[in-house]
Amino acid sequence: MSKTYDVVIIGGGPGGYVAALQASRLGKKTALVEADFLGGTCLNRGCIPSKTLLKHAEVIESIEQAKEWGIETGEVSFSLEKMMKRKNDVISRLRNGIAFLMKQGKIDVLEGLGSLVTPNQVKIVNSNREEIVQANSIIIATGSTPLVPPIPGLDTVSYHTSDTIFDIKEIPESITIVGGGVIGVEFATIFSSLNTKVTMVEMADRLVPSEDPDASKLLEKLLKKKGVKILTSTKVERFEKSAMKNLVHCTDQNNKPVTIESDELLISIGRKPNLSALGNVELKMNGRFIEVNDRLETSVKNIYAIGDVIGGYQLAHVASAEGIVAANNIAGEVDKIDYKVVPRCIYTLPEIASVGLTEKEAKEKGYQVKTEKFDHVGSGKALALGETSGFSKIVYDAEYGEILGVTMVGPHVTEMISEGSAFIFLEGTIEEMAKMIHPHPTVSETLYEAAHNAFMKGKK
Amino acid sequence: MAHEIFMPKLSSTMQVGTLLQWFKNEGDPVEIGEPIFEIMTDKINIEVEAYEEGILLKKYFHADDQVPVNQIIGYIGEPGEVVPDESPGIASDESTDDASKEESSSTEATVEVVDNVTSEGNLENEKVRATPAARRVARENGVNLALVQGRGPNGRVHEQDVLDYLKGNHVKATPLAKKLAQAEGVDLSTVKGTGVGGKVVKDDVVSVLQPATPAVSTDVKPEAKRVKLQGMRKVIADRMVQSKNTAPHVTLTTEVDMSKVKELRASLLPIIEKQTGYRVSFTEIIVKAVGQTLTRHKKVNASLIGDEIVYNEEVNVGLAVAVEDGLLVPVLNNVDKKGLASLTTEAKEISKLAREMKLKPNQMQGSTFTVSNLGMYAIDGFTPVINQPEVAILGVGRIQDKPVVDNGTIVIRPMMTLSLSFDHRAIDGAPAAEFLTELKRVLENPYELLV
């Protein structure tokens, strides 16, 4: 007699385990199927390990900078082994934390690869056994894996993706990063701090093309200052193995061939959905991703899908939000996902954080777009921190001062972006932001300064 | 010094009150203004609040107990203070100076309750849970408490809620929604908020400005409009359920030949119109006939209060008046003693006030019988619901020409159906039938009304 659950969730990442907790809180008998480790890509191969390593990079940079301030440390040495150990410690603590939460929520964690047999049966396969459980509702939260493009010669060279790069044993002398998106620029930051010679290749005309052009421009400038070579509007044609090195043959913006030589290769051009759980059940697709409605329902009744597997933002916190909506709907509480306020964070040095619409998106939507930017050069706190390169920028509608989007570049702005989120979510306007007292001295004041300038301009 | 809590006297006729529930247990701390128990009188339910601060030391009565006015119900005082094991009876002046001082202050407090109740005791306000301060502010500003969203326990209205309501803060909206609404001249109170707690967000205002195009997709069902049962509707709902659940209704019907009333009205119309400026209608003539008949049928002109039937001396007839999304019952006092001209004036004026929602509380109090006239619609007869604590209500149908048999021949007569619902706990079928039969006789020979 197989076990029966109200909800079976396939995938224990930030979408799946949050959905499991919510379902259990709402009184549903819940099981979570995970083939690898709890926490998914985010915890094991993504957000958390990269942020741990980025903290190391930040410390290294601070020590460098301290020299100019008169704080001498002598020769700085670092051990990749110890850094990796700390990263692994952080990961295992968080994994245990999730396991504890599952236990506390009386959620059965079923180890193995989950897949659908019928719309209410899930098969779980691991090295020891095979099991089939009954499920009244199913949430597919299987996430995504790095996308490796079919570029000639890739099979002849050894390359990393974000799945494997965290386990390198020694710091490479040089690395070529293919793809200048969020993952690419974060690794460029890490490796350049470790004194690796980094070259980035991006097909678009700028790094992080989805973000505000001002942020891209600033990031490119700062990465170049750290010695990162950046090739934008450049297309990778083929890979080649030569003696000890990997060769990347590209065509640059002027249609001229360029060849990059490096020890290691990181492919970070995007991620593809992991559809391994679909098994025999046919779901309506949206391109490569599973199609869902705003209640996260797929084309088959009682099957829901959340997170990277449905595309969209492909962010951990979006997956979690979707998980809660899916669990609520399963429990009979009608809930809809709202993507109006999704903060986006890039953990480079300095950090980039944004929420809402970019200037371009706002114009496309037909708003009377105005922007106001305040450079951190004018911030006392940023000056004191020695990090004056950033800025705070508000995109707003001229008519009522509606705040449409906020982009911030600077130290710890990923922590500060929630102010922008709150304003957009609660529909505050430029006027309220300009009237709200901000603490001094802080970097967050720059957002207030921008709002204040915008408000005063509007009054004239 | 422990302070007495006693059954407040909430109206001049109140003898006993029923203790409905305690909000506090013995040993619970009590603050000034906190409701400690709820009582029911013949007219209303009301929460009685503490006028002293301290610990609820003693409760002498349980829920559903009937407690005489001024009987000591409990004590509030310091922890450990000794109070009598049994209720010392009626709160009296035979106490120490100190106690009588307290007593007088407590009495004052009680009087305040009486004030609030009698002056605010109209259909809506008496049913609304509100603090005395809230009632005062509402009274001073002419606010209908039923419309104020209370944020206290059990939805009790606090002073701040009334002030917020006056400020127009009763509509929650985001700053952006407010700006947009102001610029576009949208009244936010008419916008249904979809945000957290019904907060009006920008999209709600936008959807008012541009009515959504009919959904093309078939799987999107148009959503039914949902209105919370509150305010006057809530009061009506509660009172109807209360009446239907407690009073065994029996409805008697009879057909009345209105030929002579029609004649009477036709001849009085110009006279009364000249005198008062108002056109006398059938309603006033029926109310007059009802008043006249009630004086001879005391059993129908009664109120059932608690376990007593009160045979009222005055004949005050309530007139059910339809108002926007509701129903009010303004009262015509001493109908039996008034002439048709003054009744007409009074009925017209009070109905107008009702429709404009300008009735004063005392204009809705004290009825001993109610008339509900649906004769302006194509309604022949119906089963009206008794307006408690009254024991009977008359439903009036339309006047319609019908063939009737008169002395062996079929003639056409203007006929009208009267429906009398009565509370069988208080009246039996025979006396109710006698009343209705006499009313029919009076209406068929209406000239006695002029005598």
Image: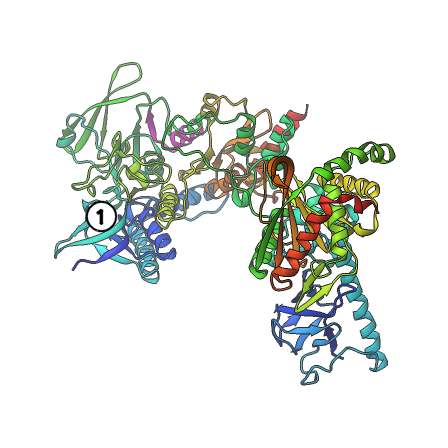
Image location of residue B284, percent across then percent down: 75, 42
Task: Give the left or right position of residue B57, taking residue A258 as reference.
Answer: right
Residue A281, given in percent of the width and then of the height, sits at 19, 40
Q: Quadrant of the N terminus of chain A?
A: bottom left
Give whichever of A219, B33 is nearer the camera.
B33
Q: Name, please, the residue furthest toward the front.
A: B408
Vertical arrangement, residue B28 with respect to residue B11, above or below: below
Q: How is the image coloured?
A: rainbow
Element marked by disc 1:
loop
**Vertical placement of residue A454 versus A171, above or below:** above
Q: Chain of mark 1?
A: A
Q: Label 1, on which residue?
A: A120
In the rendered image, residue A222, in percent from the top left (x then y), is placed at 42, 31
Q: Quadrant of residue A171?
A: top left
Query: In the image, is residue B433 part of the stretch drawn in magenta?
Result: no
Which amino acid type is shown beneath numbered disc 1?
A: Asn
Q: Residue B343 sits in which quadrant? A: top right
Magenta-drawn segment:
A218-231
Figure quadrant of residue A454: top right
